Image (spheres, rainbow, N blue to C red):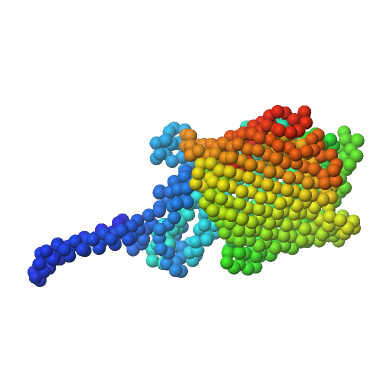
Amino acid sequence: MTRIVTIDRTWLTVASRRGVPPRATGLGCIFLILGVTLFCQSVRAQQYTGGCIVSAVQPESVDLDQPRDQLARQSDLDIPAGARIGRINIVRRPIFDTTDPEQDNFLYRTLNALNTPTWKSALRAQLVFDEGDVYQPGTLDESERILRQSEYLTAAWIGVTRVCGNELEVTVLARDTWTLLPSVGASRTGGENKTNTGLSDPNFLGSGKSVGISHKKDADRSETSVDFDDPNVLGSHWQAGLSYDKRSDGRGRSAYLERPFYSELAEWRFGLSGEDDIREQSRYVGAEAIADYRQDRDFASVDVGWRLAERNGSQLRLLAGFRYDARAFERLPDETNLDLLPDDRTLSYPWVGFDYRENRFREMTNLTRLQRVEDVRDGFVWRTELGYSSPGFGATEDRAVLNMDFRDALLATDTNYASYGFSQSGTWRFDQHRFENLIGTLSLEYFHGGAVDWNSWYTNLSFTAAHNLTVDQQLLIGGDNGLRGYPSNYQQGNRRALWTLERRYFPDWHPFELFRMGGVIFTDVGRAWFDDGRNSGPDDGVLTDVGFGLRLASSRIEVQRMLHLDFAFPLAGDDSVDQVQVLLRGRSRF
């Protein structure tokens, strides 16, 4: 309710009786009205009701279909020092806004009616602040990032909407997506066809829990899977999940229970997981499987972590745990001529590690998704682990285990984002005095445009080096991992390089208020090779392709996935390579 200032007529009468000239009285009124007008302009959109100040930015003014509008809608309130969160107001929007004439039709109203809205408790469980907490802007921003990662929400916005003395009202705005999806689909990548059917719901009955059953078939196997995942067990920050896979060549079973570092302010973590996996594996030469064998893997892990220190937005965490990873290999009955069979190996080791990160983020649009707010890290993350595997713990031999991952943002502005990263994994065998399965990857990516214009440039450069790979490990390149104009697994080696350049287009077009569309023109240049000169495939030179593609993403249904349709034309390769490769697949990035 806007404050209304009135001027009592008796004031004029009293002024006249006291000898104030009428002209002076009129001038006084003019100055009084002018002062009131200036005062009202100073408070502008802030409204006063019941002793509270209400922000002009309310949930109904936020357009969740326009990411740039979301970013522009910031609270205009002055927050008192030491203020506490007195009330959390959760506002849920349906899938379709039927107050919009373009969305007010029978189909959209029916989908809204059939959808079970996300429980408020499921949304509240993901927040890293609570009623009674001292207000910290960072916790609101972090909660917004967490909600935006949810598969069952299309968008989320959090802001302070009311100040009542020393207490605040924080509003959480979220819009549901249609999640119950029967799926019947097919995809083609690197010359290989894949089919899938199933039924999944990542927001089962609005609970935020994920259930699904699916059947997939590709060149290697057919597989039927049942999955369950609970990101907030009993409304807590604990997470749990399990899955079971029945395959034509084996089976898979896995389960986990963990309390992650759910927030930058979380003091500790705990994780427990296990996996039993049996499948047939292949070795490739020139996109052809030349040998098959069976792999039986048993994996178990337990780990803990503590936040040690934080300063100027940087945080140090101590990690520790124990892992058991056993792999057994056997020859298949129809592979009597298999000349190389991997040796059985077991890693069983305690480990200790550190995680050091800068908790700075930037909100951007049209970076890797179509018309979605994206949270990118404007800082670095460095994680390293060192372990010792010994027969005393059940291992096959003594090894040192070293894993490391590093990523840093070089540039982050409204129109530019650049980052680089390095990852490394492998072991040192003390009995043979050499590294085994040592793999390191250096990558660089750059985005230009997108946040302001309706087009952008994207480029990615990566280089991978491997040393002493075991028989079951191969470094491959082809249509399923970057070279879109070539068959899958076309080249192999212990070195791999790939460069991609894309010109991307994403018009502000929202047909039926249901889809977002984009286009891309691209070129890929890459190669896998052996540093000792061994042959790496039918064509062991540098491979190049050019092409174009379409992108289709729904703003209402399964918003975390995007349909890719690419047409790639190889500029090198042998006669076995088709003149055009058609790739149809689902991806989470542009």
40 lies left or right of 275: left
What residue is rendered at 71% in x and 43% in y?
A: 498
Q: Give whichever of 363, 542 is nearer the camera.
A: 542
439 lies left or right of 265: right
Query: Can I make out residue 538 in this image?
Result: yes
User: Horizontal and vertical percent for residue 375?
Assistant: 56, 52
71 lies left or right of 307: left
Quadrant occupied by the C terminus: top right
User: Horizontal and vertical percent for residue 381?
Assistant: 65, 58
What residue is rendered at 46% in x and 49% in y?
A: 70
Q: Give whichever of 390, 141 is nearer the camera.
A: 141
User: Horizontal and vertical percent for residue 213?
Assistant: 65, 39
Q: Count the marks.
A: 0
What residue is rendered at 45% in x and 52% in y?
A: 72
Query: Can I make out residue 112 in this image?
Result: no
Rendered view: 455 above or below 579? below
Q: Kindly indicate the quadrant of the structure image that contains residue 425.
A: bottom right
Quadrant occupied by the N terminus: bottom left
Q: Give whichever of 537, 510 is nearer the camera.
A: 537
What residue is rendered at 36% in x and 62% in y?
A: 52
User: Horizontal and vertical percent for residue 585?
Assistant: 64, 36
Rendered view: 163 above or below 510? below
Q: Kindly indicate the quadrant of the structure image that contains residue 98.
A: top left
